[in-house]
Image (cartoon, grey):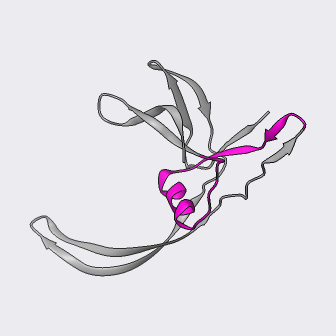
Amino acid sequence: MNRIKNLTPGAINVMIGTRTQIIIPSEGCAHVAEFVTPSADLDLDVGQIPTCSTRYGSVEGLPPSDWVRGDGGWSGTYYIVSAMTALAVRASGDYRDDLLCPGEIVRDASGKVVGCRSLRRA
């Protein structure tokens, strides 16, 4: 049987209808490295606000794929990551079929994300 690991900072609530059916707890955090350079402050009517430029680096915290083919077919671990992490993996030239992102985001009346209806293949 295949496994799933959530490498986002929070639990993933998979919703069927209006109810959470499956909760996938966080087991770590894969992310894209950031390199921040301060820029000129903005002088605004509400006050002075700093700005910065950000350069993105490599993906950190993502284990290598562990998929193997056995007598029963392929088996391994799917990893739930942020869309940004999945895009950075793709941009690096690495194609991984084991990465998933929250799909069909569900929000409450105030706009807060409360879950997703599916997992999107990255």
Report the front residue among 80 and 49: 80
Report the front residue among 69 and 104: 69
74 w.r.t. 17: above or below: below
**Residue 75 highlighted magenta (yes or no):** yes
111 w.r.t. 31: above or below: above
- Which residue corresponds to the image point at 60% horizontal and 57% vertical from the top-left? 30
Figure quadrant of residue 3? top right
Quadrant for the N terminus in the image = top right
- Which residue corresponds to the image point at 48% horizontal and 56% vertical from the top-left? 84
Q: Is residue 113 left or right of residue 11?
A: left
**Residue 18 highlighted magenta (yes or no):** no
Q: How many numbered tags mark residues here? A: 0
55 w.r.t. 77: above or below: below
Figure quadrant of residue 107? top left
Q: Give the range drawn in magenta.
A: 71-99
- Which residue corresponds to the image point at 28% horizontal and 73% vertical from the top-left? 51
Report the front residue among 88 and 9: 88
Counting from the top left corner in percent of width and height, residue 111 is at 31, 35
Q: In this view, does 114 lie to the left or right of 91?
A: left
Counting from the top left corner in percent of width and height, residue 61 is at 65, 61
Counting from the top left corner in percent of width and height, residue 23 is at 60, 31
- Farthest residue toward the right? 71
- Which residue corresponds to the image point at 62% horizontal and 62% vertical from the top-left? 94
